Image: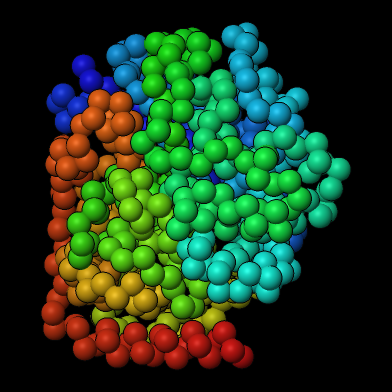
Amino acid sequence: MSLFLGIDASTQSVKCIVIDCDSGRIAAESSVNFGRDLPQYASPNGFLRNENPLIRHADPLMWLDALELAFRRLADSGIRLSAVRGVSGSGQQHGTVYLSEKISSLQSDDSLADQIRPNLSRSSAPIWMDRSTSAECRELDAHFGERLRSDTGSPAVERFSGPQIRRFSREEPEAYRRTGRIHLVSSFLCSVLCGSDAPIDFGDGAGMNLLNLNTLHWDAEIAEFTAPGLEKKLPPVLPSATVAGGLDPYFAKYGFVPGIPVVVWSGDNPNSLVGVGAAEPGCIGISLGTSDTLFAPMRNFKTDPDGCGHVFGNPAGGFMSLICFSNGSLAREKIKETLGVSWEFFDRDACAQTRPGNGGRLILPYFEPESTPLVLSPRVRRNYREASPAEEVRALLESQALSLRLHSEWLGESVRRIRLTGGASASEGFRQILADVFQADVETISVTNSAGLGAAMRAANAVEGIPFEKLSSQFCRPEKIVSPDSGLRCLYDDLLERFREFEKHFLFS
Ligand code: XUL
């Protein structure tokens, strides 16, 4: 059997998926939800409570306990983990983990959390939802100007790792000095699997405001300005197909064969690009998770003039675009809770009971600070006073789809197909709205965990040389295709203009 394991360490959970490249089937899956399964970390949504909505940190030890529990559950599912030939993973992007020194070996007796705890030089890790670094971003932008965008693929961004590290080095200079290694979530967990220091890949490394995309090396000048001596504290940055090391013997307790190749991890969005099989021009990927993200392979390197979209390394080669909407499922969950309705109603009945265009109702659902467009003080704004529960749901879904379309205009791609993934891709109503708003076919594949699947496919590609085209045809065949109603083209073109004005008015008022 040719089995490969992909791990998805996301905001709210750790999930494992094992693919069988002989039969083209998913051999096993397991999942651990931080809130439900690890209540001792008091992080129901994956981060520690903080009254300040701009501060969002998580406990890295929670990710380690979750990884162990996910492996235990995988082993208990009956799969022979000794047949796994390679591993890779996905991390929620941008989050940083601060260690006194590089990880060098693991002991077999103590848990991972107990072994890593003494090595943490900062007890918590700022994650992608943290927006506390506006001052640092303005300083970076003022110092480097346009070069930051043209060389790193993005202007200074609050949630990106560089500004986060700058803030830490200022606020806790002593702890920063004691920090010998700064990892991303992806390279931290990869290091733990190898029991040795692992590199960062071009996909996730580009979300730091530190990687020069023209040279594909850390930018020494930007790193030094970001924080003194930073470059030495970063792991090497390497192509996504690099083998980081062999699996540490620690993991034999779950049935794995020690020494199997561990392929460099990447970010969840770069891996999702691979996992939805959206490599062809004219096709974009949309992942509907805690945050909604839109991504596509990039034919020609270009950056977003508004600064909300980013350029990352594409793990399958070249570059990709990424636009992140922080209030994705987060907003859908909030509205569902407020209305007190079921998911069945939300995902199906609400759209069946209302009409496209919904009387022009629009909503800007910034329950948490938003990345696209940048909104630091959470606020929800509606352009209507009255709505039935069904109309309220449609207003949210149409507004989210319009925002995805509006903020991806800079890509200049005419979108013919959308590959949809993530938990909310199961929503019948939302699938049709996306097809109608973009006037494109919306395709879903059977696996909703595209980040984990993409990681497993990358492991198979790097370890056994299986081409991505073959892996996509095995694991990413579209299951459902929703076609647009071409009669709604004008309606949504008009509504897009209204949305553009509504958002502009909100941002400048
Ligand atoms: C992407 C981003 C989020 C996280 C969530 O830039 O911030 O999508 O990767 O996991």
Who is closer to the viewer here, 169 or 230?
230
Of the 4 image quadrants, the one containing the C terminus is: bottom right
Who is closer to the viewer here, 420 or 296?
296
The image shows residue 61 at horizontal and vertical percentages of 65, 31
**Residue at 68% of width from left, 20% of height from top?**
115
Q: How is the image coloured?
A: rainbow
**Residue at 51% of width from left, 24% of height from top?**
193
Examine the rendered structure and indicate whether residue 411 appears above or below residue 458. Answer: below
Residue 80 sits in which quadrant?
Answer: top left
Who is closer to the viewer here, 200 or 276?
200
The image shows residue 271 at horizontal and vertical percentages of 37, 45
The image shows residue 199 at horizontal and vertical percentages of 52, 35
**Residue at 20% of width from left, 62% of height from top?**
281
Q: Residue lying furthest right in this view?
A: 174
* Horizontal side of residue 208 vs 411, given as left or right: right
* Horizontal side of residue 421 vs 236, given as left or right: left
